[in-house]
């Protein structure tokens, strides 16, 4: 499952890499940083999750089937509640 988050004002995110571990993590599920591709990567309940800066926003990819679609959506909704961010589901 993949999501794209972007600012509603059309500007780029100005999130510095030093804040990735603090900001790009769910508050509703335990997670830990892991190595791999993408600008930032975590593992949630055995599911690798990557965050990558793309032209329209930040792409979030959930790999494998360790999490249900509902759990992945719940994780992204938590991050989507940040002021100025809209969430889009990529299919």
Image (tube, rainbow, N blue to C red):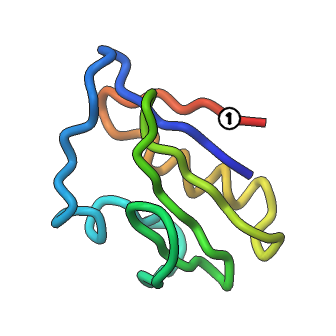
Return the residue nearer the eye: 77 or 66: 66
Return the residue nearer the eye: 83 or 3: 3
**Category of crowding for the residue at label 1, using alpha-carbon neighbours closer than 10 angstroms: few (below 14), some (14–19), many (at least 20):** few
Q: Which residue occupies 67% across, 76% down?
A: 47
Q: Position of residue 45 (x, y in %)?
A: 65, 82
State left or right for residue 49 relative to residue 73. left
- When the figure is inspected, residue 11 is found, relative to residue 29, above or below; the finding is above
Return the residue nearer the eye: 11 or 70: 11
Q: Which residue occupies 79% across, 36% down?
A: 91
Q: Position of residue 40 (x, y in %)?
A: 40, 66
State left or right for residue 84 relative to residue 76. left
Q: For the residue labelled by badge 1, is the local secondary structure a helix, a strand or a loop? A: strand
Return the residue nearer the eye: 23 or 53: 53
Q: Position of residue 75 (x, y in %)?
A: 57, 57
- When the figure is inspected, residue 86 is found, relative to residue 47, above or below; the finding is above
Q: Which residue occupies 34% across, 39% down?
A: 82
- When the figure is inspected, residue 14 is found, relative to residue 11, above or below; the finding is below
Residue reaching furthest to the top: 9
Give the number of marks: 1
Q: Which residue is mark 1?
A: 89
Q: Which residue occupies 80% across, 63% down?
A: 68
Q: Position of residue 72 (x, y in %)?
A: 67, 57
- When the figure is inspected, residue 12 is found, relative to residue 14, above or below; the finding is above
């Amino acid at each position: 499952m993949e999501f794209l988050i972007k600012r509603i004002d059309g500007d780029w995110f100005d999130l510095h890499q030093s804040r990735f571990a603090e900001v790009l993590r769910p508050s509703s599920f335990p997670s830990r940083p892991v190595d791999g591709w993408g600008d930032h990567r975590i593992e949630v309940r055995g599911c690798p999750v990557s965050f990558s800066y793309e032209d329209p926003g930040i792409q979030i990819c959930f790999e494998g089937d360790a999490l249900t679609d509902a759990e992945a959506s719940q994780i992204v909704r938590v991050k989507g509640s940040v002021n100025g961010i809209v969430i889009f589901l990529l299919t």
